[in-house]
Amino acid sequence: MKMSGRGVAMDAVSLPIEPSHGDCRPTNFGLRLRPIFRLVLALTIMAATPLAGRAHAQGGPLYLVTYISVMPNAAGSGAMMLERYRAASRKESGNQRLDVLHEAARPNRFVILEVWKDEAGFMSHDKAASTLHFRDELEKIQIAPPDQRVSSGIYGRPVKGGDRPGTIYVLTHVDVFPQYEVDCLSLLDTMSIDTSRDDGNIGYEVLPEADHPNHFTVIEAWTTSKSRDAHLMAAHTRAFRDRLLPMEGALYDARLYNELD
């Protein structure tokens, strides 16, 4: 694998790393790659980006956010599969966090939040028998392949995951034009400080994507719906949205989740 200009050459395939307006994720190429190879590719790309020095510490933890959609009539069985996968993965030596969230509005959609000690820990997990079994069973009921976002950096106030009954999670995908990458990260960093002062907030994480550093996953955790609503009406939240809007390359996509029982 070698770096060349704006792309990464890999077996004569050139993958552009600077998207144009909006979400230009290289879908066809990405779907052909197994998660472990997508991880290696993403980290290689990240090493060549302007934010790499701040966002990635060599040998540091890896953060993964994986979106899963199963058939509507398989929501129950999908939830049970994810519970078993969660229990098995948490026992692995390289795992630092593995939470499964259930989308409130659409019960056939889930998110896996993972933190692994390092790349070696994740690669070992990727080949574990429980992971392979989960992947095979999921393929039978999924609507589309899992959409996995990899990050090697974290900003803001980490969400303390792990079985907090009643916690309300909000996951937001923030996508800005490439020239606003640094400005957006600064804005999100300030937002994390302001949000930490809001009543009921128990975490505000900002995860830049390794292969698309102008894309961010924001993870919020709230004790109650009332506290989250108050946050939405706060002056600092409305000011944040005003400043972010001119930078956006795609719709500000916020979704509500509960922790899977």
Image: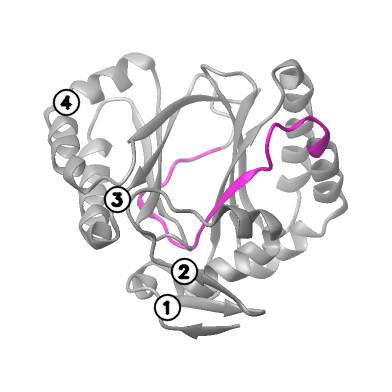
- Secondary structure category for the residue under label 2: strand
- Asked if one can make out residue 118 in the rendered structure from this viewpoint, the answer is no
Give the residue displayed 84% in from the left and 50% down from the top: 132
Camera-nearest label, 4 or 2: 2
Q: Marks 3 and 1, how far apart in space?
A: 19 Å
Q: Looking at the rendered structure, which numbered label has been put on residue 234?
A: 4
Q: Mark 2 highlights which residue?
A: 16
List x then y, in percent, for residue 249: 30, 47
List x then y, in percent, for residue 145: 69, 42
- Secondary structure category for the residue under label 3: loop
Q: Is residue 145 above or below residue 255?
A: below
**Kind of residue indicated by mark 4:** Ala
Range of residues picked out in magenta: 139-161
**Kind of residue indicated by mark 3:** Val
Q: Mark 1 highlights which residue?
A: 48
- Secondary structure category for the residue under label 1: loop
Q: Quadrant of residue 87?
A: top right
- Residue 255 within the segment the image draws in magenta: no
Q: Marks 1 and 4, how far apart in space?
A: 38 Å
